[in-house]
Image: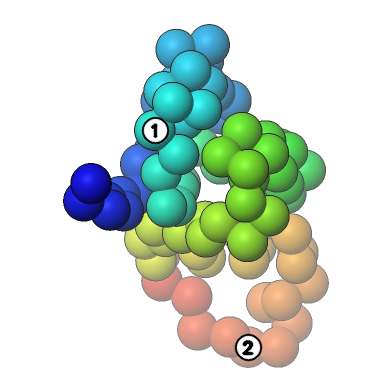
Amino acid sequence: MMTRAFICGCSGLAFTEEERRFLAENAPWGLILFRRNIDNPTQVNDLTSEFRKIVGRADAPVLVDFDFVLLFQAIVKYFPHIEEYNVPFPEI
């Protein structure tokens, strides 16, 4: 039997029942998160913990696809005083 490894994503902020079944049956190597999957740190932690529990590997990798605008928005949101340090931010 050939070994296969693949990374998958999910449709929203939480897994659907169909996605949970797919993950359990196919045990992907990793998970990739996009903007549509990210709301706040607690939600991301819950989502990644659930993924690792479903696939049965506490070390299953989770990749985050950040574009620079999203990254800067997150920095400003979670570190509101960052502008005091004269960090050059792009126009958002």
Q: How many marks?
A: 2
Pointer 1 residue: 26
Residue 55 image point, x, y percent:
56, 40
> Badge 2 local density, few (<14 within 10 Å), some, or many (20+)?
few
Vertical order, 53 against 92 (above or below) = above
Numbered disc 2: secondary structure? loop
In terms of depth relative to the viewer, which is nearer, 35 or 49? 49
Q: Amino acid at mark 2?
A: Asn
Q: Are there few (<14), some (14-19), or many (20+) residues within 10 Å of tag 1?
A: few
Residue 81 picture quarter? bottom right
Q: Residue at x 35, y 41 (%)?
A: 8
Residue 37: x and y in percent read 50, 37
Query: In whole angstroms, how far apart are the C-alphas of marks 1 and 2?
Result: 47 Å
Residue in front for this viewpoint, 59 or 72? 59
- Can you tell which quarter of the image residue 68 is in? bottom left
Specify how the rendered protein is coloured: rainbow
Quadrant where the C terminus sits is: bottom left
Residue extending furthest toward the bottom? 86
For this view, does 65 lie left or right of residue 79? left
Q: Is residue 24 visible?
A: yes
Residue at 63%, 43% (x, y): give it.
56
Position of residue 43 measured from the top left corner of the image (x, y, whole percent): 71, 37
In the figure, is residue 26 to the left or right of 79?
left
| Residue 61 at x, y percent in the picture | 52, 60
Disc 1 secondary structure class: helix
1 or 2: mark nearer the eye: 1
Quadrant in the picture for residue 19: top left
Q: Earlier in the sequence, mark 1 or mark 2?
A: 1
Residue annotated with mark 2: 86
